[in-house]
Image: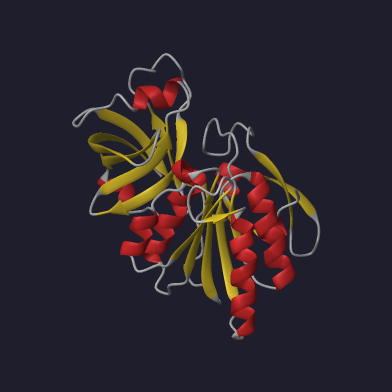
Amino acid sequence: MMDVTSRVIRQTPLTAGYWALELDAAPVVGQARPGQFVHVRVPGLEQTALRRPFSIFGAEGGVLSILYKTVGRGTEQMNRLSPGDAVQVIGPLGNGFPLEPEGTPVLVAGGYGVAPLFFLASRLARKGVVLVGGRSAEDVLAVERFERLGWPVKVATQDGSRGETGLVTMLLDREIARLKGVSEAAELYACGPDGMLRAVGERAIAAGCRGWLSLDKHMVCGVGACLACVQNLRREDGTAWIGRVCHDGPVFEAREIVW
């Protein structure tokens, strides 16, 4: 974990309200693993002590990428950043995804949950399939980027404006059945809203495969000191404990999580 001053390289618009921010942050990039996150202090908001956590979208060649949506004062200020502006970054933080799947990787993303999964897809030696869901086409992100990595992508939107109409778990049920039909094990990786994560975790347990879920909790310190992002968990022996998502996660195996 390092606290570095990075410089903005560029901002790239994705769909309405979504942006990819690229930073020159070689020290962080050199240590980053898929599923980890960074804590960012947004210039112009120094009067607010809290940094903002963002999943790592990409980390290559000294360039750190994060994905964000302009939804409030912090991200609106972030959207005003220009090339060369200085940004304070702490990271990489947390524990990421395992990179040696026991079965065919199935990546399940909801909205900007694609961010850590795209980074994961760039590092996994074995390719599988990416399932992306959103309320509408505007919430479907990074499809072309996954495809350029050689990953097939299937899309579902609740309003039917892109891909199939329905929830991404509909695509997941079909994919689990397909793999079972050819006697292949699946390994699920997911990031998105809690309801989606719980549904993915239930399917992983029912299918007898591993399911790695990246939880999205409100984080304040990012290093496990403030206890703002606690989560009820269970150990392999069934005993309960309370973990800190920022420190013990954000990635947990489905059987660990008590919803």
Q: Work out whether 206 lies above or below 259.
A: below
Residue found at the very far bottom of the displayed protein: 183
Relative to 243, is 51 on the left or the right? left
The quadrant of the picture occupied by the N terminus is: top left
- x and y percent of residue 71 in the render? 47, 27
Q: Is residue 17 rendered to the left or right of residue 161? A: left
Specify whether residue 220 is in view: yes
Residue at point 33%, 46% (across, down): 28
Q: Is residue 186 left or right of residue 99?
A: right
Q: Position of residue 203 (x, y in %)?
A: 70, 64
* 195 left or right, relative to 109: right
Q: Using the image, determine if residue 46 lies above or below residue 10.
A: above
Residue located farthest toward the left when viewing the structure as drawn: 84
Q: Position of residue 43 (x, y in %)?
A: 33, 22
Q: Is residue 199 above or below residue 236?
A: above
So how many labels did they put on this image?
0
Query: Residue 174: image x %, image y %?
Result: 62, 69
Q: Residue at x 40, y 67 (%)?
A: 151
Relative to the observer, which residue lies in front, 17 or 6? 17
Residue situated furthest top in the rendering? 47
Is the image coloured rainbow, by chain, by secondary structure, or in one colour?
A: secondary structure
Res. 211 in view = no
Question: Residue placed at 68% from the left, 47% from the top?
Answer: 195
Which is more toward the observer, 81 or 234?
A: 81
